[in-house]
Amino acid sequence: MSALNKKTKDLLKRYLTGERNRFTDKVSFIIRDTIKVIGVMGHPAISFAIFYDDLLAPKTGGTGHTMEVCVQCQVPYIDQNVWEKWLIET
């Protein structure tokens, strides 16, 4: 999944060939967040996700990447626009 993302594809290649700098260091987080969605070795894929997103720059950065993985894997998700209303209603 991370290799399919235009923004992370090159970074992933550079990281896997051993390049380390302030940009490629973030790849481990991208891989971690992808695995959280798709699962790995005995850990099942998720069926639903809850995010706290930056509403001034929604669906960007690592959270945005993970949201995109959810979209690609057809995993429904919500952000605080939804779950904060639940807190107010209870």
Image: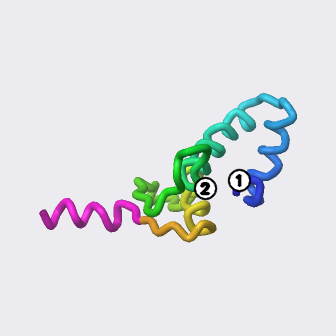
> Where residue 79 sits in the image (x, y, percent)?
40, 62
Toward the right, the furthest residue is 17
Q: Is residue 76 left or right of residue 42?
A: left
Q: How is the image coloured?
A: rainbow
> Where residue 61 sits in the image (x, y, percent)?
59, 51
Which mark is drawn over residue 65?
A: 2
Q: Is residue 25 above or below residue 31?
A: above
Tag 1–tag 2 contact (CB < 8 Å): yes
The residue shown at (46%, 55%) is: 54
Q: Nearer the viewer, residue 59 or 90?
A: 90
Task: Give the CA separation, mark 1 to mark 2.
Answer: 8 Å
Q: Nearer the viewer, residue 50 or 80?
A: 50
| Callout 2 secondary element | helix
Looking at the rendering, the stretch of residues picked out in magenta corresponds to 78-90
Which mark is nearer the camera, 1 or 2? 1
> Where residue 21 sits in the image (x, y, percent)?
76, 30
Toward the left, the furthest residue is 90
Q: Amino acid at mark 2?
A: His
Q: Does the magenta segment cover residue 43?
A: no
Q: Does the magenta segment cover residue 88?
A: yes
Dot 2, how many residues are within 10 Å of its Cα: few (below 14), some (14-19), or many (20+)? Answer: many
Q: Is residue 75 above or below residue 36?
A: below
- The residue that disc 1 covers is 2
The residue shown at (84%, 39%) is: 14
Query: Which quarter of the image is occupied by the C terminus?
Result: bottom left
The majority secondary structure of the magenta stretch comes to helix
| Callout 1 secondary element | helix
The residue shown at (77%, 54%) is: 3
